Every structure is written in structure tokens, then in C-alpha cells.
Amino acid sequence: MNQPMNTLKQRLTQAGIALNEPSSTAPLESPWFVRVLQAFSGWLAALFLLGFIATAVVFVLESSVASLVVGSLLIGGAFALLRAARSDVLEHMALAFSLAGQLLVAWPAVEMWGISASLWWVLLALQCALALIMPSQVHRSMSAFLASLALTMALAVNGLAPVAIGLVVLVLTLLWLNECRWPGRIGAVQAWGAGLLVGLLVLQGQAYSNQLAWLYDSGAQWFGPWLASWLSTALVALALVCVILQAFRQHSQPAIAQRLAIYGAVALVAVVSVYMPGLGAGVTVLLLGFTIGHRVLMGSGILLLLMAASSYYYWLDVTLLMKSLMLLAMGALLLSIRWLLKRWWLNQWLTVHKPAPLGDANEQ
């Protein structure tokens, strides 16, 4: 009797399941307002320290080599501080040091290339490298956010600023869909996704508020504005297809007619998104959050849809009646897609959980 029990215990132990371990209480986390206060304290201390350093080594701005060396030292010091940081104060202090170092590193690049595409591509590469190597979730999110801005500025030089939004949506979708593929990097993937999500919201808000109109109306050197808009829409549609394919993997494959209807709806959303910028991004982020069960993504998708609808409603190139009819048609389309998906999932659930006939039950 004891031998089978010992064998079972050995098998569970080999599988990594611990038995008869003393119960231990999980460490208590600080409330959010305490962490915010600690972050503010870290930034305040870092700013005072950086101000003291700036008064002592102000000459570094006069030399590109000195600026590059001091900036690299600040970034290296921030990396070492983040490796040893065990509190929010030190983490945010290191983030402030890193941002100051990045500014000093960027200063020689500005003097060499000016405000050109080469400058923004170099800054994009720098932010991608920092997002990969920095051992901090906050820093990775900040680097991903700054990378989205640098990508937009780099593409804006050639009149391709709208394409940046499509690229951000596609990378954001691929990151969140493959979140669990690398168990050891889940935290990093979540940090990158959060930074890109904030970047997407900022880019869409700037596009709607028209504060950076030169990014979208500049003379294109490679493509016309309409072609850049179509390319951005195609990237967003590709991201939406990836979300739908992931939903199909989580459930059984629908029939061919249902799949054609869903892909037709994706094509219709893509076409309408050309005339209502931001609609495809909002639908993609909303469905992405629903697919992986992420409430922040779902809320961000709803916010993007509201921003797109409000911006389109105040577009002066189309009459109010036409815009109202377009919004009515889009609302009816989305509700129809929701009804079809619910009906399909209900049929699939009934097929899987179909009760056994009474005759078979009596024989058993």
C-alpha cells in the first residue's frame, strides 16, 4: 500500500508539484497612492541631482564627444541602478538618469544630422535597444512609447506619418497575441505592449487634434497622402485578421460561409477606415482585448472608437446628414457582426456539449 503512494509522490515531485510544503503568506504590495508618491520622490530627487551635475559639467554641451561620453555614463549608471533597485524611488530615479543620458547622447546626433530622418532612425534604434536590455518594466514601457514617437517622426520626413499608426497597431497586436510564447519574457512583452498602447493613443490624439498637422500634410517624397493612408489601413486590417485567426484557434473553425462573412466585414471596416481614420485601430484593439481577456485593451479600444467617431462627426468636408448615415451604417454593421459571432459561438457550444440520447443513457 505504501509503495504506490511513494511512487505517486515521486512522480508528482518529478513533475514539479510540491507536496506538504508549509503555507507562506504572499508579500504585501504597497497601495497605488504610496507607489505614486514614491515615484514622485524618485523623480524629484533625480532632478535635483541632475541639476547639480549640470551646473558642474555644463561644458559637456559644448563638446560632442564629452556629451556622448557623459550621456553613455548616465545610461550605464541607470542600468546598474536598475539592476540593484528594490523600490519605486530608485527605479524612477534611474529612469530620470537614463532620460537625461539619452538627451546628451542625442545632442551630437542633432549637431551632425540636424532634424532629419537619419536622426529619428538613430533614436528609434536607441530606444529599441534600451527596451530590450533595461531591467525595468517602467523603463521598457517608456522606451517603447518613445520608439513609437521616433518611428512617426522618421516616417513623417517622407510623408508617411499615417503608416506609423498602422505599424504600431500591427506590432502591438503581435506582441499581445504572443504574450505567452516566451514564459521568461512575459513581463517584458507586457511592458512593450503597454508602451506601444500609450503611443498609439497619443498618436491618434495628435492626429485628431491637428496639433501636428505638418506630420500628415507634409509634401510626400515617396507616396501621396492617399496612398500612405491606404497603406496604414492595410496594416491595421492585417492586425485585425491576426486577431480573428487567434479567435478561431481558441474555438473551433467556423463554416466557410461564416468565415467569408467575417473576412468581408474586415474588408468593409478597412474601406470605411480610409474615410474615418482610427476606426480600424479602435476595432482591432477592442477585439484584441476581448480575445485575450484584457480589460485595459478593451477600454482603450472603446476610447479609440469614440475618438474616431467624434473626429469624423466634426469633419467639415462631408455634410452632417451623410456623416450621420455613415455612423448609423457602421453601428448596424458592428451589431450584426456581434449577433453573428454570438450565434456561431452558441452553436459551437451546443455541438460540443450536446446531451446524450435517452436510449444511450439508459443502456449505460
Image (cartoon, rainbow, N blue to C red):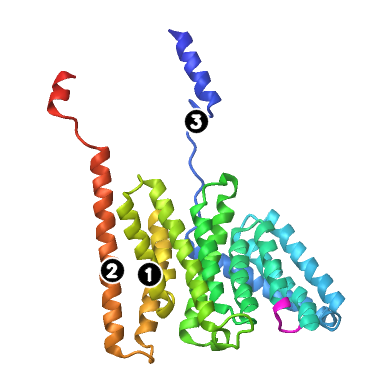
**Secondary structure, magenta segment, majority class:** loop
Give the Cα separation between the discs numbered 1 and 3.
Answer: 55 Å
Image position, residue 314 (x, y; %): 36, 88
- Identify the residue shown where x is 27% and y is 38%: 352
The residue at the far top in this view is 1
Residue labelled with disc 3: 22
- Sequence-wise first label, 1 or 2: 1
Q: Is residue 360 magenta?
A: no
Residue type, label 1 = Val
User: SS class of the residue under badge 3?
Assistant: loop
Q: Could you say where residue 273 lies in the image, as x and y percent from the top left?
A: 41, 75
Q: Which mark is residue 269?
A: 1
Q: Which residue is mark 2?
A: 333
User: Between tags 3 and 2, which lies in front?
Assistant: 2
Q: Amino acid at mark 2?
A: Leu
Give the distance between the C-alpha atoms of the residues marked 1 and 2, in whole angstroms.
9 Å
State yes or no: discs 1 and 2 in contact (Cβ < 8 Å).
yes
In terms of image quadrants, where is residue 364?
top left
Marks 3/2: CA–CA distance: 56 Å
SS for dot 2: helix
